[in-house]
Protein backbone atom coordinates (compact mmCIF):
# COMPACT_ATOMS: atom_id res chain seq x y z
CA UNK A 1 0.00 0.00 0.00
CA UNK A 2 1.30 3.44 -0.85
CA UNK A 3 1.90 6.20 1.68
CA UNK A 4 -0.91 8.79 1.95
CA UNK A 5 0.13 12.21 3.28
CA UNK A 6 -1.56 15.53 3.99
CA UNK A 7 -0.88 18.76 2.15
CA UNK A 8 1.35 19.98 4.98
CA UNK A 9 3.39 16.78 5.01
CA UNK A 10 3.77 16.81 1.24
CA UNK A 11 4.81 20.48 1.25
CA UNK A 12 7.43 19.74 3.90
CA UNK A 13 8.60 16.70 1.92
CA UNK A 14 9.35 18.74 -1.21
CA UNK A 15 10.58 21.83 0.65
CA UNK A 16 7.88 24.45 0.13
CA UNK A 17 5.32 26.06 2.40
CA UNK A 18 1.82 24.60 2.62
CA UNK A 19 0.44 27.85 1.14
CA UNK A 20 2.69 27.54 -1.91
CA UNK A 21 1.78 23.88 -2.35
CA UNK A 22 -1.94 24.68 -2.07
CA UNK A 23 -1.59 27.11 -5.01
CA UNK A 24 0.18 24.44 -7.09
CA UNK A 25 -2.39 21.77 -6.24
CA UNK A 26 -5.29 24.04 -7.22
CA UNK A 27 -3.70 24.37 -10.68
CA UNK A 28 -3.73 20.59 -11.25
CA UNK A 29 -6.28 19.71 -13.93
CA UNK A 30 -8.55 16.74 -13.46
CA UNK A 31 -8.11 14.09 -10.81
CA UNK A 32 -4.68 12.45 -11.14
CA UNK A 33 -4.16 9.08 -9.43
CA UNK A 34 -1.78 10.52 -6.84
CA UNK A 35 -4.32 13.12 -5.67
CA UNK A 36 -6.57 10.82 -3.66
CA UNK A 37 -8.80 13.59 -2.29
CA UNK A 38 -8.80 17.34 -2.84
CA UNK A 39 -9.05 19.51 0.22
CA UNK A 40 -12.10 21.74 0.41
CA UNK A 41 -13.88 23.58 3.24
CA UNK A 42 -12.58 21.67 6.20
CA UNK A 43 -11.59 18.52 4.32
CA UNK A 44 -7.87 17.81 4.24
CA UNK A 45 -5.98 16.87 1.11
CA UNK A 46 -5.05 13.21 0.78
CA UNK A 47 -2.02 12.76 -1.43
CA UNK A 48 -0.27 9.56 -2.50
CA UNK A 49 3.35 10.48 -1.75
CA UNK A 50 5.31 8.61 -4.46
CA UNK A 51 3.12 9.70 -7.35
CA UNK A 52 2.96 13.27 -6.08
CA UNK A 53 6.75 13.47 -5.71
CA UNK A 54 7.14 12.26 -9.31
CA UNK A 55 4.61 14.92 -10.44
CA UNK A 56 6.45 17.61 -8.47
CA UNK A 57 9.83 16.66 -9.97
CA UNK A 58 8.40 16.75 -13.52
CA UNK A 59 6.78 20.11 -12.80
CA UNK A 60 10.01 21.59 -11.39
CA UNK A 61 12.08 20.26 -14.31
CA UNK A 62 9.64 21.77 -16.80
CA UNK A 63 9.71 25.10 -14.96
CA UNK A 64 13.51 25.04 -14.79
CA UNK A 65 13.69 24.35 -18.52
CA UNK A 66 11.33 27.23 -19.30
CA UNK A 67 13.36 29.53 -17.04
CA UNK A 68 16.62 28.47 -18.71
CA UNK A 69 15.09 29.11 -22.16
CA UNK A 70 13.83 32.50 -20.97
CA UNK A 71 17.27 33.43 -19.64
CA UNK A 72 18.82 32.31 -22.91
CA UNK A 73 16.44 34.56 -24.84
CA UNK A 74 17.28 37.47 -22.53
CA UNK A 75 20.96 36.78 -23.07
CA UNK A 76 20.46 36.89 -26.84
CA UNK A 77 18.64 40.20 -26.51
CA UNK A 78 21.47 41.57 -24.36
CA UNK A 79 24.02 40.46 -26.93
CA UNK A 80 22.07 42.29 -29.61
CA UNK A 81 22.00 45.39 -27.45
CA UNK A 82 25.70 45.03 -26.74
CA UNK A 83 26.54 45.13 -30.43
CA UNK A 84 24.32 48.16 -31.00
CA UNK A 85 25.70 49.96 -27.95
CA UNK A 86 29.31 49.18 -28.85
CA UNK A 87 28.74 50.91 -32.16
CA UNK A 88 27.36 53.99 -30.37
CA UNK A 89 29.01 56.44 -28.00
CA UNK A 90 28.58 54.54 -24.70
CA UNK A 91 29.44 50.85 -24.43
CA UNK A 92 26.84 48.67 -22.71
CA UNK A 93 28.25 46.79 -19.74
CA UNK A 94 26.60 44.03 -17.77
CA UNK A 95 26.12 44.29 -14.05
CA UNK A 96 27.46 41.60 -11.77
CA UNK A 97 23.95 40.26 -11.30
CA UNK A 98 23.38 40.04 -15.06
CA UNK A 99 26.69 38.23 -15.57
CA UNK A 100 25.82 35.81 -12.76
CA UNK A 101 22.38 35.17 -14.29
CA UNK A 102 23.87 34.59 -17.74
CA UNK A 103 26.46 32.22 -16.30
CA UNK A 104 23.71 30.38 -14.39
CA UNK A 105 21.58 30.12 -17.53
CA UNK A 106 24.52 28.79 -19.53
CA UNK A 107 25.31 26.22 -16.86
CA UNK A 108 21.65 25.14 -16.68
CA UNK A 109 21.56 24.78 -20.48
CA UNK A 110 24.70 22.61 -20.36
CA UNK A 111 23.24 20.55 -17.52
CA UNK A 112 20.01 20.08 -19.49
CA UNK A 113 21.86 19.07 -22.67
CA UNK A 114 23.94 16.58 -20.71
CA UNK A 115 20.81 15.16 -19.05
CA UNK A 116 19.12 14.77 -22.45
CA UNK A 117 22.16 12.90 -23.79
CA UNK A 118 23.11 15.63 -26.25
CA UNK A 119 26.36 16.42 -24.46
CA UNK A 120 29.11 14.23 -23.00
CA UNK A 121 32.37 14.98 -21.26
CA UNK A 122 35.50 14.52 -23.37
CA UNK A 123 37.18 12.51 -20.60
CA UNK A 124 34.29 10.03 -20.66
CA UNK A 125 34.95 9.31 -24.34
CA UNK A 126 38.75 9.30 -24.26
CA UNK A 127 39.06 6.01 -22.42
CA UNK A 128 36.72 4.37 -24.95
CA UNK A 129 37.59 6.19 -28.16
CA UNK A 130 41.39 6.07 -28.05
CA UNK A 131 41.72 2.29 -27.50
CA UNK A 132 39.10 1.75 -30.21
CA UNK A 133 41.14 3.80 -32.70
CA UNK A 134 44.31 1.90 -31.80
CA UNK A 135 42.53 -1.46 -32.24
CA UNK A 136 40.98 -0.32 -35.54
CA UNK A 137 44.40 0.73 -36.84
CA UNK A 138 45.91 -2.63 -35.80
CA UNK A 139 43.16 -4.58 -37.58
CA UNK A 140 43.25 -2.42 -40.71
CA UNK A 141 47.02 -2.86 -41.01
CA UNK A 142 46.46 -6.65 -41.18
CA UNK A 143 44.22 -6.29 -44.24
CA UNK A 144 46.95 -5.70 -46.90
CA UNK A 145 48.79 -8.93 -46.04
CA UNK A 146 45.57 -10.95 -46.03
CA UNK A 147 44.46 -9.35 -49.31
CA UNK A 148 47.76 -10.11 -51.06
CA UNK A 149 47.66 -13.74 -49.89
CA UNK A 150 43.99 -14.17 -50.87
CA UNK A 151 44.58 -12.70 -54.34
CA UNK A 152 47.90 -14.47 -54.90
CA UNK A 153 49.78 -11.22 -55.53
CA UNK A 154 53.53 -10.71 -55.12
CA UNK A 155 54.78 -9.59 -51.66
CA UNK A 156 55.78 -6.05 -52.69
CA UNK A 157 52.06 -5.17 -53.06
CA UNK A 158 51.74 -5.48 -49.27
CA UNK A 159 53.98 -2.47 -48.76
CA UNK A 160 52.03 -0.37 -51.26
CA UNK A 161 48.70 -1.22 -49.62
CA UNK A 162 50.10 -0.70 -46.12
CA UNK A 163 51.37 2.75 -47.15
CA UNK A 164 47.96 3.72 -48.54
CA UNK A 165 46.18 2.54 -45.40
CA UNK A 166 48.70 4.21 -43.08
CA UNK A 167 48.20 7.57 -44.86
CA UNK A 168 44.41 7.25 -44.66
CA UNK A 169 44.50 6.37 -40.95
CA UNK A 170 46.98 9.17 -40.17
CA UNK A 171 44.70 11.61 -42.01
CA UNK A 172 41.76 10.43 -39.92
CA UNK A 173 43.70 10.80 -36.65
CA UNK A 174 44.96 14.26 -37.68
CA UNK A 175 41.42 15.38 -38.52
CA UNK A 176 40.09 14.14 -35.17
CA UNK A 177 42.91 15.94 -33.32
CA UNK A 178 42.28 19.15 -35.28
CA UNK A 179 38.53 18.99 -34.59
CA UNK A 180 39.17 18.35 -30.90
CA UNK A 181 41.56 21.31 -30.71
CA UNK A 182 39.10 23.59 -32.52
CA UNK A 183 36.05 22.49 -30.52
Image (tube, helix red, strand yellow):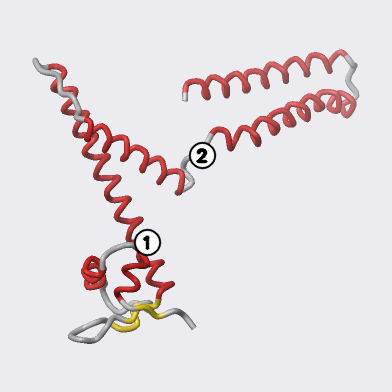
Taking depth in this image into account, of 174 and 97 the one nearest to the observer is 97
Residue 68 shows which numbered tag? none
Q: Which residue is mark 1?
A: 58
| In the image, residue 183 above or below residue 66 | above
CA separation in Å, label 2 and label 1: 23 Å
Q: In the shown orientation, is residue 162 left or right of residue 122?
A: right
Q: Residue at x 24, y 86 (%)?
A: 43
Q: Residue at x 30, y 45 (%)?
A: 68
| In the image, residue 124 above or below residue 11 | above
Residue 141, given in percent of the width and then of the height, sits at: 78, 24
Q: Which residue is mark 2?
A: 120
Q: Earlier in the sequence, mark 2 or mark 1?
A: 1
Q: Tag 2, which secondary structure?
A: loop
Residue 52, given in percent of the width and then of the height, sits at: 37, 71
Residue 167, given in percent of the width and then of the height, sits at: 68, 16
User: Where on the picture, by quarter, is residue 38?
Assistant: bottom left
User: Where on the picture, by quarter, is residue 75?
Assistant: top left
Taking depth in this image into account, of 130 and 7 the one nearest to the observer is 7
Q: In the shown orientation, is residue 12 left or right of residue 93?
A: right
Q: Residue at x 46, y 80 (%)?
A: 2
Q: Tag 1, which secondary structure?
A: helix
Amino acid sequence: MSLIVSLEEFAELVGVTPETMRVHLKQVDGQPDWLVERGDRGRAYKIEAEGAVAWWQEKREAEDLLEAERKGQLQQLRLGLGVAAAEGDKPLTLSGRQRREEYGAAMEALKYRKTMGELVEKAELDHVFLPAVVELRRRLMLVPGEFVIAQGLPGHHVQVLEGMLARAIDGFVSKVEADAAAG
